[in-house]
Image (cartoon, rainbow, N blue to C red):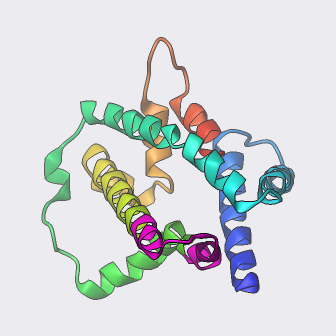
Amino acid sequence: FFIYLFYVDIVISLRFSDIITIWIFPKSPSWIILILFLLTAYVVAKEDIQTIARTYVLCTFIFLIFILFLLSAYNDIHIGRIFPIGQNPIKKIGSGAYSSFLEMLGFEVFLFITPSFQDTKKKLFTLSFANFFTTVLYTFIVFTSYIRLSNKENSYIIDPILYIFKTYHSKMIESLDTLFLSLWTIV
């Protein structure tokens, strides 16, 4: 489990440092951003599990801000972009599921956390709620990107949500994608 979790952490850290390099600091070397990210993660990870859990509970407002940011994308939508539903065969959908597999990693950490729980019902409720919330959030994200962007845009844009945030213009917020990435670094 340790090797597997170490691998997952490295893959997620590399992906996140690439996103930060591309969207915020394009002229900075990605290895410097990766080192800074890993140092920050180390400072948080050296605490006990209850401190980390309390920190995440305090940071749940970030999900609400993220959902509000996504709702701003509903100004210029076209619901017909999701049709025809089911046009791709199951094999193609399954091969596309691999790319979203990385986003769902992390629930196996629950195996390490469960010994600190006393109540089995609380364990199952917590895991079920986390799975439900993640599934609903990702469904909302995918649905939003499909109805906001054209099929052609969705096929070649790597990070569609950041692209949607970059197109947002306001008098108060100049760059919604940078603000989002700053908040999402905590998560």
Residue 185 left/right relative to 163: right
Q: Residue furthest front?
A: 118
Position of residue 101 relative to residue 146, above or below, is below
Position of residue 34 relative to residue 79, above or below, is below
Instruction: Residue at 15%, 67% (x, y): give it.
Output: 85
Estimate the x, y position of residue 143 in percent, counting from the top left: 28, 54
Estimate the x, y position of residue 110 in percent, counting from the top left: 57, 73
Q: Residue furthest top?
A: 171
Quadrant position of the N terminus in the picture: bottom right
Q: Is residue 122 magenta?
A: yes
Residue 44 left/right relative to 69: right
Instruction: Residue at 49%, 69% (x, y): give it.
Output: 104
Position of residue 90 relative to residue 116, above or below, is below
Considering depth in this image, is 122 or 5 the residue closer to the camera? 122
Highlighted magenta segment, given as a residue range? 108-127
Considering depth in this image, is 65 or 145 the residue closer to the camera? 65
Q: Main secondary structure of the magenta part?
A: helix
